[in-house]
């Protein structure tokens, strides 16, 4: 008797093969001729496996009434070529065991579709639905594809710290980490003395592993981080999480154009792998999640065309002359941050494909980006994609000590607190570049899901960190 996963049985199970299967019941149907059909799912693939349980199976009468949606069962039986349409094989049970019942009056996941909002409230059960099973497998395939992309190019995986005392992005969105007793502090009315705190200075959850990645890029060479990052952005949008995963490659000797090339190859390679390795799940998203059923063509379109590259200044001109500017909620002018509506206009209406915008105004971007000679812009790049907008942010880094110090002053940062970062420019500095890809935004892109909260197992957003 071979223990098999449902995916394996459906793909390669042979007529007559004896199997042992375990999983959760999706549905049960009883036929008048004294047998039952059970749709079994064990999460290994989107499809269910049909189990035919004859009333002659030992214990049938007692057990079958507990074989309800959500219950877990173990089946021993034989694979048979299926006479039914749409499935290659089915299983004829020889034994049936109910491992765990699920009260049909209480089990929250009934057969018909539930709203995404409701499913977020039962995040402990939503992976049992078709949609979240598929998201989970696609997330897994995408993360394997990410490691594969970098590993096959000789990049070294670096684990950057989660707790930090430096703010990489300087956007003031950090979650503080402290062991000080806030109640006592408040009651004492005294000012906070961080010397008494765990790290003897203010500490936070990291917003990015980039600064640490730069240390390794300038020692072991091409490297990347892939880990959780945290931002206390109090924005309730469909594209922001307070905890999200970021992939941050950092490469010595790369200039901005090399960085763009890598970012484009990276996105294409990961999408290509997911399309190849998650065919059924991707077909499901195309049919059931994307209202226009255009997800697969959108993905293929991304693979088939070169990304547009456009300086920020030209993008602003284009948006202002688009005849659309009056209709935007936020009017565009040079020096303003582009809003999601502008990004979507460029990628969905104007170019109809991903766009890399570069050379942004220095006032919009963090201190570490390399200053251009025009005195106004920095070597920044944002990769924008249809449906999602910004999926990657990156830059060439400022490697010149004097310019970096000047720039830190301009950004009101104390070089003392970043002494080790500044040291990298003192000792053997080199041109280098890198970028950060928001992993959940990538998942949003490839699944077509409208809300980023459905692209991570347990979303953390303002006023909600359950599970
Ligand atoms: O553009 P960002 O802020 O860039 C950085 O953090 C750089 N240190 C990266 C680097 O150069 N190594 O963030 C990078 C990406 C964004 O493009 C977006 O995809 C994602 O991270 N991101 C978020 N994803 C979900 N929720 C949020 N609140 C996000 N903030 C940024
Ligand atoms: Mg950004």
Image (tube, grey):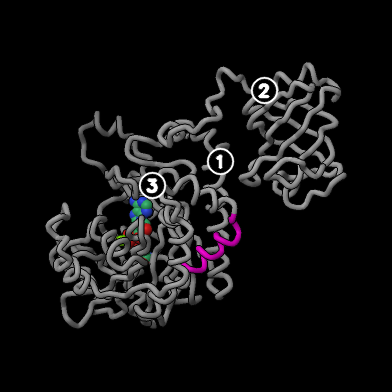
Q: Which disc, if any, is residue 152?
A: none
- Camera-near label (2 vs 1) is 1
Q: CA distance from mark 2 to mark 3?
A: 34 Å
On the image, the x and y values in percent for residue 156 come to 54, 70
Q: Which disc, if any, is residue 130?
A: 1
Instruction: Depth check: give the residue in front, 277 or 218.
Output: 277
Q: What residue is at 19 percent from the left and 73 percent from the top? A: 313
Q: Which disc, if any, is residue 101?
A: 2
Q: CA distance from mark 1 to mark 3?
A: 16 Å
On the image, the x and y values in percent for residue 14 come to 83, 49
Q: Earlier in the sequence, mark 1 or mark 3?
A: 1
In which quadrant of the rendered view does residue 253 lie? bottom left
* Neighbours of disc 2 within 10 Å: few (<14), some (14-19), many (20+): some
Instruction: Depth check: give the residue in front, 196 or 160.
Output: 160
Q: Secondary structure at mark 1?
A: helix
Which residue position is annotated with label 3?
A: 450
Q: Secondary structure at mark 2?
A: loop
The segment highlighted magenta reads: 267-279
């Amino acid at each position: 008797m071979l223990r098999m996963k449902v995916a394996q049985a459906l793909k390669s199970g042979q007529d007559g093969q004896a199997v042992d299967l375990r999983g959760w019941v999706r549905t049960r149907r009883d036929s008048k001729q004294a047998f039952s059909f059970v749709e079994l799912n064990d999460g290994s693939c989107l499809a269910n496996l049909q189990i035919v349980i004859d009333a002659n199976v030992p214990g049938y009468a007692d057990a079958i009434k507990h074989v309800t949606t959500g219950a877990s069962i173990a089946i021993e039986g034989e694979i048979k070529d299926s006479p039914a349409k749409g499935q290659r094989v089915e299983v004829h049970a020889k034994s049936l065991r109910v491992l765990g019942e699920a009260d049909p009056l209480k089990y929250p996941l009934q057969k018909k579709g539930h709203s995404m909002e409701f499913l977020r409230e039962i995040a402990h059960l939503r992976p049992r639905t078709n949609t979240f099973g598929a998201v989970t497998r696609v997330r897994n395939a995408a993360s394997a594809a990410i490691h594969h992309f970098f590993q096959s190019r000789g990049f070294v995986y670096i684990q950057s710290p989660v707790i930090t005392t430096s703010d990489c992005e300087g956007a003031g969105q950090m979650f503080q980490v402290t062991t000080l007793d806030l109640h006592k502090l408040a009651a004492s009315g005294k000012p906070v003395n961080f010397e008494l705190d765990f790290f003897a200075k203010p500490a936070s959850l990291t917003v990015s592993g980039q600064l640490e990645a730069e240390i390794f890029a300038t020692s072991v060479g091409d490297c990347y981080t892939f880990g959780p990052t945290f931002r206390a952005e109090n924005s309730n949008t469909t594209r922001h999480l307070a905890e999200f995963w970021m992939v941050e490659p950092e490469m010595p000797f790369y200039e901005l154009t090399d960085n763009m090339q890598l970012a484009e190859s990276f996105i294409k390679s990961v999408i290509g792998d997911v399309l190849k390795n998650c065919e059924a799940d991707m077909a499901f998203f195309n049919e059931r999640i994307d209202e226009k059923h255009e997800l697969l063509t959108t993905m293929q379109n991304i693979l088939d065309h070169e990304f547009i590259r456009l300086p920020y200044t030209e993008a602003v001109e284009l948006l202002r002359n688009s005849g659309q500017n009056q209709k935007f909620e936020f009017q565009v002018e040079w020096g303003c941050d582009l809003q999601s509506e502008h990004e979507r206009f460029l990628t969905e209406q104007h170019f109809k494909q991903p766009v890399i915008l570069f050379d942004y105004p220095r006032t919009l971007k963090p201190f570490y980006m390399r200053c251009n000679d025009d005195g106004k812009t920095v070597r920044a790049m944002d990769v924008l994609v249809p449906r999602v907008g910004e999926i990657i942010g990156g830059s060439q880094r400022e490697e010149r000590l004097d310019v970096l110090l000047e720039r830190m002053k301009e950004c009101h940062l104390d070089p003392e607190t970043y002494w080790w970062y500044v040291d990298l420019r003192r000792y053997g500095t080199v041109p280098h570049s890198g970028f950060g890809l928001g992993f959940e935004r990538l998942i949003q892109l490839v699944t077509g899901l409208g809300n980023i909260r459905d692209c991570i197992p347990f979303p953390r957003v303002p006023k909600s960190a359950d599970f």
